[in-house]
Image (cartoon, rainbow, N blue to C red):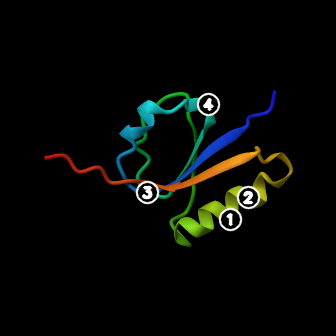
């Protein structure tokens, strides 16, 4: 069965702890920063730091064009600030 959705994240060095609340098999992280992601069972592709998040999202679309799921959610990495 094909995936109905995927979450595509353009990440530089942001904290991705919020992914602990998401089904990991539906997540793709395109990392343009330090290779320090330790989430487990997540697709991670390191990319050169060029073009900001728009380049990342475009890259995902053109490399997966023939197998895109019904829904794709595009996110930038998110800085979480705790007090």
Q: Position of residue 70 (x, y in %)?
A: 76, 45
Labels in figure, total: 4
Q: Which residue is mark 3?
A: 33
Q: Secondary structure at mark 1?
A: helix
Element under disc 2: helix
The single residue placed furthest to the left in the displayed view is: 83
Q: Is residue 65 left or right of residue 19?
A: right
Residue nearest the observer in this picture, 18 or 40: 18
Q: Is residue 24 above or below residue 65?
A: above
Write down the residue under mark 2: 61
Query: Is there a contact, CB below 8 Å, between mark 1 and mark 2?
Result: yes
Q: Quadrant of the N terminus?
A: top right
In 3D space, how far apart are the residues under numbered discs 2 and 4 (Cα atoms)? 18 Å
Q: Residue at x 65, y 42 (%)?
A: 6
Give the number of the mark in front: 3 or 4. 4
- The CA span between labels 3 and 2 is 21 Å
Find disc 4 in the rendering and name its residue.
25
Among numbered discs 2 and 4, the one appearing first in the sequence: 4
Query: Which element is circle 4 on?
Result: helix
Q: Where 57 falls versus 16 (above or below)?
A: below
Q: Nearer the viewer, mark 1 or mark 3?
A: 1
Compare marks 1 and 3 and give the one earlier in the sequence.
3
Residue wearing tag 1: 58
């Amino acid at each position: 069965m094909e995936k109905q959705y995927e979450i595509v994240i353009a990440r530089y060095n942001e904290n991705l702890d919020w992914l602990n609340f998401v089904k990991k098999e539906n997540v793709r992280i395109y990392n343009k920063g330090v290779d320090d992601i330790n989430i487990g069972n997540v697709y991670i592709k390191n990319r050169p730091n060029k073009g900001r998040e728009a380049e990342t999202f475009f890259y995902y679309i053109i490399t997966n064009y023939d197998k895109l799921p019904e829904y794709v959610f595009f996110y930038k990495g998110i800085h979480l600030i705790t007090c």
